[in-house]
Amino acid sequence: MTALLLAGACFSAQPSAVADEAPGGAQKRTISRRQLDKAVKLGLWRLAGRTSRTGRVASRAYRYQDGGIEALVALAALEAGGDPRSPGLRVLLKRLAKRSPERTAARALRAMVYARLGKSRRRLLRDDVQWLLHAQRDDGGWGETPSAPCDVFDGALAMLALGQADRLGAATPTSAWDRAKQFLLAAQNPDGGYGYQYAPGETPRLRGFSNGSATAAAAVMWSVLIDRKQLPPPGDVENHLWKCFLRTAHWLEGHFNIQAVPEWYWGDAPEHAYRYLLLLAAPSLTASRSQWAHLPGQLAAFLLDSRKPEEESWATQPLAEDDAVAAAWYVLTLCRARQELLAAQPEPTKIAPAFHPGMLLLVGRIHHAGDWNAQEHTEDRWSEALAAAVSVGLKRQDVFAGQDYNPGVAMVHLTGTRLEGFGAPARAALKTYLQRGGMVLIDPAAGGREFFDQARDMLVRMFGPGSITLLPPDDPLVTGRFAGDVGSNLSAVRLTPAAAQHAGRAQGPPILWVVKDQGRIVAVLSRYSLAVPSAEAPSDPPAGYDPADAQRIAINVLLYTYAARQQGLGTGD
């Protein structure tokens, strides 16, 4: 079992990321992608060693009974890039599907797993969503079980699950969000923090005083509400909801500590989960203080420094987090920190390591419930080619289906061999981005028909029947005659043997389908893969374009998009 959870996960050396200052102060240092990947792999090996061949994970931590530990381990493996079809994840998912958990943590963690698996688990996801909605107490919170007192840790997990499911179309009624707001308002202590348990109408008990992990959990609950637009715009600082959230942020700033959970609590504070929750809340906390943006680097540095390979156990409080639980939260935290660090700064190219661009373009890779990270280094190779050709740099920024897109991202790249998780909210977010000047380049990572058909159907749903047309060979995007002829002439690009056999020709203009909005191309859908294979790729490449031509096609789309945004260029019609 030791290698099974690792099957399908991607670990490779990448350019370095910087761990900068966070609240409380921290020295600047450089952390490499290789260091992060090695630490994540170590955590996965530890989890695999505690998972039986039937999918049972050995754990004594009370919060994670009833299937919760198996869901937590599956979530960590998926977050690290694990393939759900690999043997280790298959047995975990099979075991999870057979259970009917009666604990909030188990239901919420399993729902988050299903949310990452897309339509194949949609019915199971909806079942867990309905359970969580019914388990919400009258006062708006959640307990360890539906009949237990409210507990903000379980509330944070429940709201994370509902928020992720909501983005995939399993909508949460407004009444549930409203009740959660009322709980957060009522449960907040006078100092702005939160305790684990809250009993309405009673003065705080021993467990009710403000505590770091409880307040981080409450900050996550606030963050979900902010993400789902359940609070007014941030500029309305007089609104009582924003005031309460900012008091939570100020408590965390005043008690900032990543080495241990701040403020005493009962002897079993979940410190590994605390760090992960703090990291999840950090983007919302930047509304209070910009230094929160540096938390991923400081957390990554702390976790890398604190892990001693010779130690046999990762746990510090066995009742709350035994070895398996601690390792799973460790993997989740490092994966999230790695994602934030690599998205936060440009990566140097191999072709021009001393290159200092006068212009930097942002390209987004869209996370969806399918294999969104197939051919994960494609944008890096586009960047190398662009840097070698013109004085323009390229930086990848990960974006998430269903969330608002950064308007500064010039183009988003959507790829994979299966497209999942693009429900109505995800389509609406993408359409808004495109209508505001963005562009989406869609290509099937292996040139497969399934992804192409799914993407085409998605575009029709977004823009209506007849909106998608085949790009003619004399279009400026193909000829390169736009923005002073800055583009490449793509009239005779070469196809790989697999693509040539399907297309009936070995070269010619690229087969691209486009959607126009008010005369501007907003979506380009390639029939064949634009991925640039690595040196270790198989000798028989999938249905796609010659690597050099694939780069030229992608760069034409990128430069065309940027020129249209900056100069108001049309399509040449």
Image (tube, grey):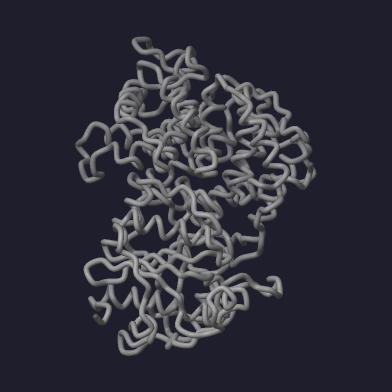
Q: Can residue 245 be spotted in the picture?
A: yes
Task: State whether residue 370 is above or below residue 437.
Answer: above
Taking the spot 54% from the left edge, 82% from the top edge, the residue there is 505
Q: Is residue 211 left or right of residue 64?
A: left
Task: State whether residue 544 is above or below residue 286.
Answer: below
Taking the spot 59% from the left edge, 36% from the top edge, the residue there is 272
Residue 539, percent from left and from top: 71, 75
Observer-nearest of 142 and 83? 83
Taking the spot 47% from the left edge, 21% from the top edge, the residue there is 151
Q: Is residue 228 left or right of residue 322?
A: left
Residue 329, percent from left and from top: 60, 39
Q: Where on the picture, by quarter, is residue 64?
A: top right
Observer-nearest of 387 and 248? 387
Task: State whether residue 291 is above or below residue 276.
Answer: below
Residue 127, percent from left and from top: 48, 28
Q: Quadrant of the N terminus?
A: top right
Q: Can residue 352 be spotted in the picture?
A: no
Observer-nearest of 197 and 419? 419
Residue 558, percent from left and from top: 40, 74
Task: State whether residue 70 is above or below residue 535.
Answer: above
Q: Where on the picture, by quarter, is residue 10?
A: bottom right
Taking the spot 56% from the left edge, 83% from the top edge, the residue there is 506
Task: Spot the residue most to the top.
Answer: 202
Task: Spot the residue most to the front.
Answer: 504
Q: Is residue 477 left or right of residue 272?
A: left
